[in-house]
Every structure is written in structure tokens, then in C-alpha cells.
Image (cartoon, rainbow, N blue to C red):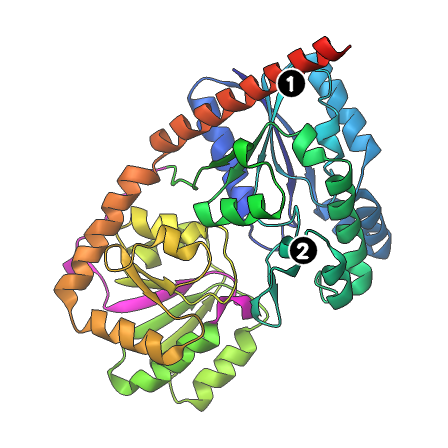
Amino acid sequence: MKILLVHNFYGSSAPSGENTVFLAERDMLRKYGHDVIEYTRHSDEIRNRGSTGMIQGALATPWNPFSRQKIRQILIKEQPDVMHVHNTFPLLSPAIFHATRGLRTATVLTLHNYRTFCAAGIPMRNSVPCTLCLDRHFALPALKYGCYRNSKLATLPMAIMIEMHRQIKTWHRDVDAFVALTGFQANKLTDAGLPRKRMHTKPHFYPALPESLPWKERDPGVVFIGRLGPEKGLHVLVEAWKAWGNTAPSLEFIGEGPERLKLETRVDQSGLRHKIRFHGQMPFSQVQEKLAHARLLVLPSLCFEGFPMVIREAFALGVPVVASRLGSLPFLVEDGKSGVLFRPGDSADLYKKIKNLWDNPDELAAMGRNARADFEEKYTADVNYDILMDIYRSAMDVRHQRNNKHREFI
């Protein structure tokens, strides 16, 4: 099968799960013998140009005719069976889907976030989930509240993009298959307007088959891995450790973000420096080593996550997960089996759940084994490849039917 993979890479200054997924799927498809073509753009192209670049990105976000023309040329020359798009923001725009009209190439869009209907990408406002734009099928609330970067001006091109492609029915007429990361996300986005019959669910996968470190060889510690942002609920985690006091296990934060200074100040004020450490950004290999030696991963998110990459890594390494009972997380962490769920934003409930696990080490170790079994059942490359091929075949069938109807009409 010949496949055109399309992606707008986010800025190189910040790690991106979407970039990682794009590269992992590209390598997987080539490993299985497919002819893979790539067309990519990089946000660094405009980030390095200051205000001129910002204007360029804003103008390109709703509709970029140059990207559409370039993709059309590639499609006509290469005639791929499938065009699989991961991210169009900000330089490509959804206009690229219109380039396939009248051609045999099927189109697939992976929904890494909620940007088809949510200007912020993550449905969250004032540190709580917000689905106004999804529920009302209208992007006006995003403009009212300046949801993208807390700026009405920056939100404007996002809102125009959402409303333009809703009105010209890009998602219904030009995308043959959508790939949600969880059932929760699939339900939210189909309720918001994406065609339900073309919605598929495919999780992330871990490319390798790592060894799970024996439980007795692990450090008696807990980790958080990810962006230190307000949407992650990390102050809740610190408060849980404060309630636990001197008998709490070690807690390590791995990652960077705008909340780091506030969190470190909170830790200092609570007298927890001997219990909580901040490592900042680390190379992937070192992060995996830290995770492999941990006995628990905690994700106290306050927002609707897509599919945190660190969950598939934790499961691959046999590390159980404690997570908020919110959004997609209960679809990934089976309460009482591969981890434990707690009430979002409730530090007392988080403390209670983690302490109970920590006081029952045999139960915690069993959850680690269950997490690894979950990985082997759902998140290996072989399993993921089979799901992806089914999605591609479904998209090709939809495209074939669409073209036949068009020929009958003319």
C-alpha cells in the first residue's frame, strides 16, 4: 500500500506527543513493507520570524491555498492509496483535504486533540473542563473568553477555521475516516458534529517490547512525567504528599512547564524538599529508566486528556497508574486492576487512594503485572498495526463509494 503521511511538527523547543506518534507510525508502516511518502511542515518556520511569522501562521490556519495546491500535486504524481493526516495546525490548514476531491486517495485524520471544534485544543477554561463550543456547535464562546493563549486576537483565526470547515462540511465531505484515541474522545467529537459512522478508535502504541523490571529491584518511589502546566493538577499531588507527611515515599517530577516555580515554592513552604524532587526535562532514555524503576505513576489531570503517551510507557514497563476519574483516563486505567482512579482535584481522595495502595504492596505489585498484561493485549506495535490497516481499508471503501456516487451524479 502506498501511503502519504502529512504532519505539521510543533516547535522543537517543546516535546510533543503528536510528533512522536507521527514518527512511530511512519516507522511502523515502513517496517511492514508499505511505500510511505511524507509531507511535513514545522512550526519553527514561523516561530523564528517573530511577529511576521505569527501573522503568517494566523493567515494560514483557516485555509492555506498553497498547501492545498502542493498536496494536490503530490497526490496526482504519487497516487497514494491513503493520505493520513496527523496535524494541520498552523501551516497546513484543513484545506489540504479538499485537494483529494475527484481522486482515488482515501483520507484519514488522527484526532490528537479536540481542535476540530475547540480553539484551545484541550477543552478547559479556568482550570476546569469546558465543552461550550462542542456542546453548542459554535465557536463563539472561544472568542468571548479568548481560549487560545488567553487572547481573543489569537483565538480569532482558530474560531474562523472551526466555523469555516463546519459550514463547508470539510469533515463530512472530505475525510473518509477519523481516528480517535479513546472511546471518550470519539463520543465527545461525534456529539460535537463529526460523522459517527466514520469514527474509529485506535490507541497509541509502544514500538518496542521492553523488559519489565522485577518488582523487588525497583525503587520505593512515585513519579509524575509530563508538562508542568496548570491543567495537570500537580498542586493536588503536592497537597496529597503534604497530608502524608514524613512517612510518604519519594515523589519525582520529570518535565518542564510554567507551573514549576509555583510547585517548587509550595514544596519548600510545606517542608517536603526531602521527599519531592524536580528533575526538569530529561532525554527519553533517562525518563524510561526512571519510570522502569518506579512503583507508581500518578496523573492528577484536571483536563480532558487525549491519550497521555506516558500511560502506554508505564504499562509497557509494568508500572501501575493512579489517575483522575476524568475524560479519557478511566478508558485507559482500569480501576482496581491496572491502577486506581480518584476524584479530580481532590487531594484528600488522592492521598487516601495512594496510601492504601502503598500499605498493600502485594496488591500494588499485582497491578503492575496487570498493567503489563494490558500493554501486551492492547498497545503493542503488532496490535496497533492491525487496527490501522482496518481503518485504512474502511477509508478506502468510503472513498470508493463516494467517487462512484459522484460519477453517477455527473
Q: On screen, 351 above or below 13?
A: below
Q: Which residues are magenta?
A: 208-233
Q: On screen, 209 above or below 100?
A: below
Element type where label 2 sits in the image:
helix
Neighbour class for label 1 at 10 Å: few (<14), some, many (≥20)?
Answer: some
Mark 1 — residue?
Answer: 402
Q: Residue at x 56, y 73 (%)?
A: 259
Q: Amino acid at mark 2?
A: Arg
Q: Residue at x 48, y 84 (%)?
A: 266
Percent from the top left, x then y, of residue 403?
67, 14
Disc 1 and disc 2 in contact, CB within 8 angstroms: no
Report if residue 342 is visible in the image: yes
Element type where label 1 sits in the image:
helix
Q: Residue at x 53, y 73 (%)?
A: 260
Percent from the top left, x then y, of residue 154?
78, 59
Hey, which quadrant is residue 399 in on the image?
top right
* Depth check, front residue: 36 or 350: 350
Numbered circle sitting on residue 161: none
Mark 2 — residue?
Answer: 136
111 sits left or right of 202 in the view? right
